[in-house]
Image (cartoon, coloured by chain):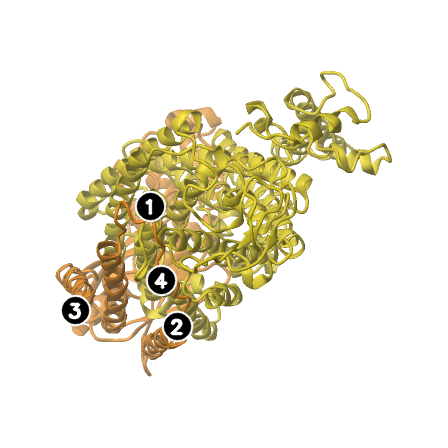
Chain colours: A orange, B yellow
Amino acid sequence: MLGIALVAAVITTAVAVLIQWLPSSASEEMDRITFTYWFATIICIAIFSLVIGVIVYSVLAFRVQPDDDTDGPPIHGNTRLEVIWTVVPAILVIAIGIVSAVVLEKNADAGANPLRVKVFAQQFAWRFEYPGNVRSDELVLPLHRHVKFEMTSVDVIHSFWIPQMGQKQDVVPGIETEIVVTPTRTGTFTLICTELCGLGHATMRAPVRVLQEAAFSTWLSKERAAGGGAAGGAAGAGSTGGAPAGGATGGSTTATGGAEEALGSKTFASAGCGACHEFKKAGTDAQVGPSLDDLTAAAQKAGESVPDYVRESIEDPNKVVVAGYQPGVMPQNFKESLSSEEIDALVAYVGGEEAK
Amino acid sequence: MTSTTHAEAQHGTGHGDMPRRRGYLMRPGWVRAAWVTPAAFFIGMYIVVTLRWLAGWDPVYDWEIIILIAGMVTAPIGFLLGLGAFDYWLYWVSGRATLVDDHASHGAYRWTDYFKVNTDHKVIGIQYLVTTFFFFIVGGFLAMLFRAELAQPGMQFFDTQTFNGLVSAHATLMIFVFIIPAFAGLANFAVPLMLGAPDMAFPRLNALSFWMLPVAGTLFLASFLAPGGAFATGWTSYAPLASEQPFGQVFFNMGVQWAGASSIATALNFLVTIITMRAPGMTFWRMPLLVWANFTTSLLVVIATPFIAGSQFFVMFDRVMHTSFFTPDNGGYVLGYQHIFWFYSHPAVYIMVLPGFGIISEIISVFSRKPIFGYRLMAVSLIGILVLAFSVWAHHMFVAGMADWLRIPMMITTLLIAVPTGIKVFSWLATLWEGKLHLTTPMLFALGFISTFVIGGLSGIYLAAVPIDIHASDTYFIVAHIHYVLFGGSVFTIFAGLYYWFPKMTGRMFNERLGKLHFWLTFVAFNATFFPMHWVGLDGMPRRVADYAGTYGAINMVISIFSFVLGASVVVFVYNMITSWARGPIAGSNPWKAMTIEWQVSSPPPVFNFDEIPQVVGSPYEYGVPGAKHVVLKGGTLQETHA
């Protein structure tokens, strides 16, 4: 019996060691999760091998002969054994519980001076906001620094997960949830939504880049500068929007158009339009919602000009729903969550030349 | 399936004393159901239309509300009324003559009796099993459809709404109209016999419980016809997504009500039966472990099921009546849904596995020819699981954003459930030890169950440990875990139980070679399908996605292929069941030489089970004890010579 259990243990250990079960860690938190994982795995291998050892041995050793009609020995129990297999598992699981509690405590510790990043989730896009009103639809993180994410959702429940960094947290409408991640290697990763959030759930992803501390600072200050310029409207604050508008008065109308085109393109990306809509100009090919490539026919059907149709569809998406699609899928809060400059730019960007 | 002797006479006299003969259209049955159901629909519809017209609401014909009220409430009531599920009670309520000993609808004498409101627990048990296996096959077919989509990255066959609908309907059918009621079916057949009782305590309620089940299953399936497709938010149906989905969602909300009502009524019936109808001498400590298991399961059902009923009503009200129980605006509490939902749905996991524990205890003991090891601790550990089951629900919410302090206590209680579960596993192993193992099909499924369930239990330890759960939650690791528990656990035990009691139910023996083939196909394909999902999930593939990163393409192809093999294995099973039922060899009353009471009467048992109430004289598991008896049947076919 012991022999079979040992063989089972060797095979199970090989399966545990030779296959890389967890992605290679990219955060301090994932290091600790990996440790907890191995702590539990050792205990589980022992229990699994014991059980499989007994089953296989019993099948081999106690299998009845074809002509044997007798019963086995009437053993009703054994108090000592029963106490052992009540107490030992209890001790083992409590040990796992203690290790887990300690790790959980450490993984929630953001230190004294974390980088605070606000996360906004909505069907089906992620947006991030760094200190100083810097908005981004790419998540850029500094190496070896605690990052505290303060997250909220504008519609349904989403969930924030970067597999190599381990930590996961639901993003819930109506409350703010938090999570701490401390990246330990540079590179690119993917942020995945792991809570079923509707039609575009599988496409709700965002790029993640971990940079050296210095490179991160450069990136942040560059974004901050850019944020005060062309994409000023994106910060949503009316006062910062005043500066580029003032600057544009001196320029020609084409310059304004160029800035608007840039803002439209940026808004298209940050509002997550491409997660659901095909739009060649923006290089997206999603099929969740109707294609935005040629809206003339749809606008005609609605009895409106293309720009009016686009604006109406952004501000009140349920008013006209294209045949074959459902109401209620597209977020209904763009009128509140986007500034009027952003919506104007988006209408011009999607609705084409006639927008002006 | 159509035997019995003296009961035939009782059947005849019962019928003759019926208050009056009724015309073809008015007699309970499918003809009456065929016109009462649409009539009830129109009544419901015009209640809605009249109220809307009186209130001046536009449109008067709001089809969503009409289908909700008329299609999901009044029409099903009309269907049950037409079939005759309420006849006796309505006679009684209206003060007309009823007959206490009316056995007109008791027992099956021809195959059509299985399509009636029948009050015989053995008929109801078989009705349950056939119906639930129909939904099992449909649910499995849905799974193969979405496994076809998942075989390759990218979108091939379905749009995402349909995909989400398939995933949700698969889980819902399997949980609510297969696993939970399949156990109710097996227990319906076995428990009264094992107790030495002539039937369940409330046979008419028992019949009603069964007939609510096809209503639930039909609603779940009908959602595919709804505009916008089937409910698509998973079987967990989290708010607020569920309150803003297309109309198909309401079919889930209401289907759960019918399935839930069915399960609560059955559980009450089991509790009363087990408490009050044990044969003389059948003390609690002499009850077979299957009875113990159904006793604890029924307590779980009665206490927990109202919570899911509430959660689904509230989500539906948020949608239909614009309340805000679970929407963040107007003061709703989004996480409230998850707390209420899991307060049922975690105990539901035990509702789906404790009856299986009972089945395995019977089978392991009989086919090891040894008493069950540590009988009392086995029973006590069931109670331990029952109590702990209500204190662990929030382990489904470790990443949900609930109060942080709840995580550690919920982790500890969750980990502690491993202790009573471990006691059961180790006791089964000790029962095998030095036994005389007969590796029949039910025994193979029992041994297969222990090996796969241990994997499911151990992956449960990983998920109880909060830091690991934070990484693994909502990934394919969860999909792997739940299938090791509910397929490797529950479904294996359902197969084991079905093969075990098949000779008793039908009087015929199944084909042992096909049974073993079915086991090995299922065992291998099951592990090959679900074991790789552990890795896929830990490495970074979230669950409930129609499309995924290309790196997981190859392994998903392997998983899909084995899932089709798993599907094909069911064909072997169905073929074996149908042909053996029709023309298998006669089984005899006790082919397994088991000691529990159901094996001491003929196969299939007489309509009223026992000619005289049996006398229980000892433990049900005294294998190897010379001269030991569990029960003495007087005047029955197998009269005992000494007590």
The residue under label 3 is: A185
Choose mark 1 or mark 4, whichever is in front. Answer: 4
Choose mark 2 or mark 3, whichever is in front. Answer: 2
Does the residue at mark 3 contact the one at mark 1 (Cβ under 8 Å)? no
- Dots 2 and 3 on the same chain: yes
On residue B545, which mark appears? 1
Choose mark 1 or mark 2, whichever is in front. Answer: 2
Q: Secondary structure at mark 2?
A: loop
Does the residue at mark 1 contact the one at mark 2 (Cβ under 8 Å)? no
Locate the C terminus of chain B and report the quarter of the image it occupies.
bottom right
For label 2, the crowd category at 10 Å Cα-Cα, with few meaning under 14, some 14 to 19 and many 20 or more, is few
Which residue occupies the foreground of this view, B584 or B447? B584
Choose mark 3 or mark 1, whichever is in front. Answer: 1
Measure the alpha-carbon separation of dots 2 and 3: 54 Å
Which residue occupies the foreground of this view, B410 or B635? B635
Determine the residue located farthest toward the front in the rendered image. Answer: B641
On residue A78, which mark appears? 2
Does the residue at mark 4 contact the one at mark 2 (Cβ under 8 Å)? no
Chain letter for the residue marked with disc 3 in the picture: A
For label 1, the crowd category at 10 Å Cα-Cα, with few meaning under 14, some 14 to 19 and many 20 or more, is many
B463 in relation to A356, above or below: below
Determine the residue located farthest toward the bottom in the rendered image. Answer: A112
Q: Is residue B58 left or right of residue A7?
A: right
